[in-house]
Amino acid sequence: MKVLIATVGGTEEPIIIAARRLGLDKAILIVGKPASEIFDNPVKNDVNPLRVYESIRKKLESVGVEVSVVTVNPFNFEECCINAMEIMERESSNEVNVIVTGGTKIQAIATSYAAFVCGCRMFYVQETKDGSNIVEIPLRFSEFDGLSKSRKAVLKILEDGDDASRIAEKLGISKKTASQYLKELREYGLVECEGGRVKKYRLTFAGKLCRARWWDD
């Protein structure tokens, strides 16, 4: 069963986009209580995430998705984190995807931390001029740390649009060797390439993170 766990704030769009792109059988939505229920002083332009949840629920249930809700204080890191972790552990036998775009910053960070601890795949929805993209947030890097210095060197010098010949020229190695390194890095999910007669490469998000980690190696 494909389960989507998502934080909900003032807009339904991230969850609907994620549901369409990732697919799901069940959605568990972590919804923040309105600020007016938490703070004594009136809150200007207070959004009620529970109303947003109701709109999402109706849309998802109309296409056969099972939907449930967990309400939290979106300004309490501990409460948000523990609730999210308990949900993820209960659903651990399923294929779990976590969306952390909605809600308060505290709510999103707490749920991200829970996903990291539980080892769940985690995504956010990024707005671009051409629409919205689903971006996966890499969780573990220990498998990458064992890469040789020569492979890491490729990540350090790779610029968007470089091909194997250009990498070979920059590193002073053969084109065949550069192609092999790029193939391996692609299998690791650290680079991606555009099709065509000549393959042109660029770093993935995970590749960019690894380059930052290894810069002084």
Image (cartoon, helix red, strand yellow):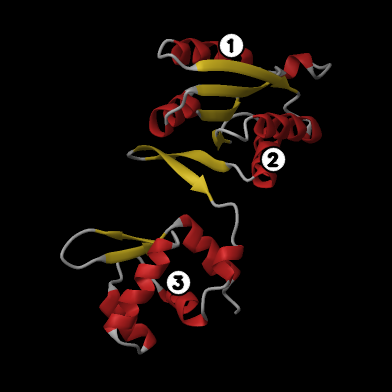
How far across and how far down the image is residue 45, in percent?
63, 17
Q: CA distance from mark 2 to mark 1?
A: 25 Å
Q: CA distance from mark 2 to mark 3?
A: 29 Å
Tell me which amino acid carries mark 2. Answer: Ala
Residue that appears at 80% across and 35% down: 78
Mark 1 or mark 3: name the one nearer the start of the chain.
Answer: 1
Q: Looking at the image, is mark 1 or mark 3 nearer the viewer? A: 3
How far across and how far down the image is residue 148, in percent?
51, 79
Quarter of the image for the C terminus: give it. Answer: bottom right
Q: Is residue 23 visible?
A: yes
Mark 2 or mark 1: name the one nearer the start of the chain.
Answer: 1
- Dot 3 falls on a residue whose secondary structure is helix
Residue that appears at 55% across and 43% down: 121
- Left or right: 182 with respect to 197? right
Please name whichever residue, 144 or 105, is drawn nearer the observer in this view of the structure.
144
Dividing the picture into quadrants, the one containing residue 59 is top left
Q: Which residue is mark 3?
A: 155
* Residue contact between numbered discs 2 and 1, judged by CB atoms under 8 Å: no
Residue that appears at 22% across and 58% down: 195
- Dot 1 falls on a residue whose secondary structure is helix
Near mark 1 (Cα within 10 A), the count class, few <14, some 14-19 or many ≥20, is some
Q: Which residue is mark 1?
A: 51
Q: Measured along the vertical axis of the image, is residue 154 above or below residue 68? A: below
Q: Which residue is mark 2?
A: 114
Q: Looking at the image, is mark 2 or mark 3 nearer the viewer? A: 2
- Dot 2 falls on a residue whose secondary structure is helix
How far across and how far down the image is residue 173, in percent?
34, 88
Near mark 3 (Cα within 10 A), the count class, few <14, some 14-19 or many ≥20, is many
Mark drawn on residue 20: none
Tell me which amino acid carries mark 1. Answer: Arg
